[in-house]
Amino acid sequence: MSRYVPLPPARMRNMLVLVPLLGTTIAVATACTATADPSDSASPTAAPTTAAAAVDPTGSPSPSASTQATIPTSAFVELPSELRKSPRRATGVEEALPKLCANEFGTGGRQVTASAAMTGTYKKAGDNEGNTPQGMIHQTIFTFDDDGATAYLARVRTAVGSCPSYTQLENSTTVKSQNLPGVGDEALLVTRTWPYANLNGTRTGGNGSSQIAVVRVGNAVTVFNDQGWEGSSGNPTILDRVVRDGAKTLDAWQR
């Protein structure tokens, strides 16, 4: 698995406003400032971000391009306080979505009316504040016209099923998927497993794993991408809790 260098935590106020324009969904942070959180000393230093533009992979304008679509921060799940290492922050959609053999999760198509992403950094319950985080969960939300949400999840199922393994750092990462019952209207759980290796690709012993969950709730789909800290394994127990809470949060927002 490739190593991910996280962006610094940022504080987010109000909501993300997304304006589809000529096939590009532009996410604008309104009344939003993105400033580094000095309390999270474990995170590597990088330039602060706000929500970034998400490009429609088809290169064609959305049918609802003339209508402003909005995904508020309240549509995103918040990590439980005992697991929250730092406040959630806006993240670019392309950065938040996982990639396996190809761009399996970025195939929103013309029926996407809005997209946005946020990242939460988590820790083990009871860890001291000075300890290294355990990982990050990137959450992306797409909203769709008509049957776009169902079609998106169907495309993801097919694409993931066509990718039993892929290569990272000269080692093979295996991919397995299964239905995730009892979450949203339908859900898919994807598990990645890889041999631990150093930066040169030399195996160091043992395996790591992390998971991706894709959940449809009505006309929206949310993708949860769990990444362990600096290439370590994710935490499936924490992800399961966040996914189930996130589906309920997304459902409440759409009502």
Image: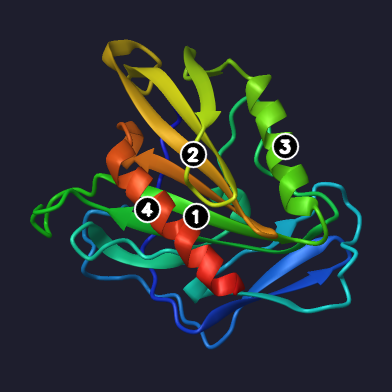
In front of the other: 168 or 108: 108
Q: Are marks 2 and 4 in contact (CB under 8 Å)?
A: no
Mark 3 or mark 1: whose residue is earlier in sequence: 1
**Residue at 18% across, 61% down:** 82
**Residue at 77% across, 44% down:** 151
In front of the other: 74 or 107: 74
**Residue at 81% across, 62% down:** 145
**Snapshot quadrant of residue 163:** top right
In front of the other: 145 or 107: 145
Report the Cα–Cα distance between label 2 and label 4.
15 Å
Report the Cα–Cα distance between label 1 and label 2.
19 Å
Q: Position of residue 170 (x, y in %)?
A: 49, 13
Q: Are marks 2 and 3 in contact (CB under 8 Å)?
A: no
Mark 1 burial class by Cα count in 10 Å: few <14, some 14-19, many 20+: many
- Of the residues tagged 2 and 3, which is closer to the observer? 2
Mark 2 or mark 4: whose residue is earlier in sequence: 2
- Of the residues tagged 3 and 1, which is closer to the observer? 3
Mark 3 burial class by Cα count in 10 Å: few <14, some 14-19, many 20+: few
Q: Are marks 1 and 2 in contact (CB under 8 Å)?
A: no
Q: Find disc 1 in the rendering and name its residue.
A: 139
Label number found at residue 154: 3
Q: Find disc 4 in the rendering and name its residue.
A: 242
Report the Cα–Cα distance between label 2 and label 3.
16 Å
State how many labels appear.
4
Mark 1 or mark 2: whose residue is earlier in sequence: 1
Q: Is residue 241 shown left or right of residue 38? A: right
**Residue at 30% across, 71% down:** 37
Q: Find disc 2 in the rendering and name its residue.
A: 181
